[in-house]
Image (cartoon, rainbow, N blue to C red):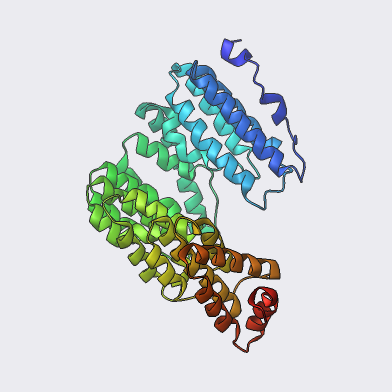
Amino acid sequence: MSPAASHKWNFAPRFRRNAFGWRSSQLAVKRVKEAVAEIKKTARKNQVLAAEGAVLFLEKVSAALAQVDGSSGAIGSAVNNAIDVLAAIIAAAPADATMRDSWLDRLWQAVEEDDIPYIELLPEYWGELCATPERSSKWADLFVKGLLMAWEKKASSGHFVYFKGTSACFSSLLKAGRNKEILSLLERSPYKWWHYRKWGVKALVAMGRKAEAIRYAEDSHGINEPAGEIARVCEEILLSSGMADEAYARYAIIANRGTTNLATFRAIAKKYPRKTAREILHDLVESTPGDEGKWFASAKSAGLYDEAIALANMTPCDPRTLTRAAKEAAKERPEFAVEAGMAALRWICEGFGYEITSLEILEAYRYTMEAAANTGKGPETVERIRRLVAAQTPSARFVAEALKRELGR
């Protein structure tokens, strides 16, 4: 037995079959991250040993997680992140031909047995795992046969036939430099899916035909295709060609859309350092007419305080976000804090904000008045608030009642 095969991994016994129960999602995520950390640490000293550990983990992980409730997506994301890291470790390991062939056989067996599935992303890296164009080409020949057989069955039966080696086939062909064959194969595909066609884009880029690659990607749009992913690929092609202005104009907003508006703003600002924060904010605001207030936090984070207040007063903005801004800026930027607090109270009076409590109204008032005291405009601010709560609406009356003592009513 080789030293690599006999090494005792701490993660190994934790990933026995059905090791995690239905409610063990958080623990499973923790164990996956620990396993990756252990393998990465080993890679700093011994790349081959680390690659052996990565193969072992990928062999065991699906069976270990088979009973976990994955509905939240957390465990799936953790495994996908692990695959991204571990595939790179395996690909980079200076293993001899016999060892690498053994790893590939074991990994493909794991893919075949992955019924949940948890490691379905692994075939996307197959060409890199093969390490050489020659080995990739041999695997590609095997996968092409299976893929064409699946497509022929689809043509004859009219039913979708799933082949686990589809991504591995294209990945292997790409690594082998058989780019024209990828395009030819895609022409025979019964499906116009981005999941397949992205390999055509990669093949065209590898052939130096970047403009054609963008057209090919754009032609992949469909009802259920991932517009954001397609935009990111096109953006990357343009950026790699030094065409940042065109990339920004055509793809920046859709390609970098995050889970929050602030995340979107930061992603674009990081990727396009030549664009000013004001330019980016302006373009983002224009892209979402009717939702101007939702860009308040982005403007504030960029130091565009006047713009932030203007946006907060254009359309509804989360009162809690505004109150937090007033609290944070009460001392250093009291004028801004006063306006943020007033906007918070205004939107509460107009009925916006999810399950706002009297305590939250008092907080908005307190931080607004704290900032007003720092500007020397306390009495004026109180009068503004009194006029605000005088509106005869249920929400305004609720705010007035919450502030009854503070306003002397």
Quick check: can you spot residue 316? no
- Tell me: 136 left or right of 123: left
Q: Residue at x 60, y 86 (%)?
A: 390
- The image quadrant where one finds the N terminus is top right
Name above or below for residue 146 compared with residue 290: above
Quick check: can you spot residue 195? yes
Along the viewing direction, whichever of 128 and 251 lies nearer the viewer = 251
Residue 250 percent coordinates (x, y): 30, 61
Q: Residue at x 69, y 42 (%)?
A: 26
Name above or below for residue 5 compared with residue 140: above
Q: Residue at x 71, y 38 (%)?
A: 27
Residue 391 percent coordinates (x, y): 59, 87
Residue 140 percent coordinates (x, y): 42, 36
Q: How many marks?
A: 0
Along the viewing direction, whichever of 190 and 111 lies nearer the viewer = 111
Along the viewing direction, whichever of 298 and 194 lies nearer the viewer = 298
- Tell me: 400 left or right of 384: right
Name above or below for residue 180 compared with residue 16: below
Q: Residue at x 64, y 77 (%)?
A: 407
Furthest toward the bottom, the residue is: 392
Residue 402 percent coordinates (x, y): 69, 75
- The image quadrant where one finds the C terminus is bottom right
Along the viewing direction, whichever of 107 and 74 lies nearer the viewer = 74
Name above or below for residue 36 compared with residue 388: above
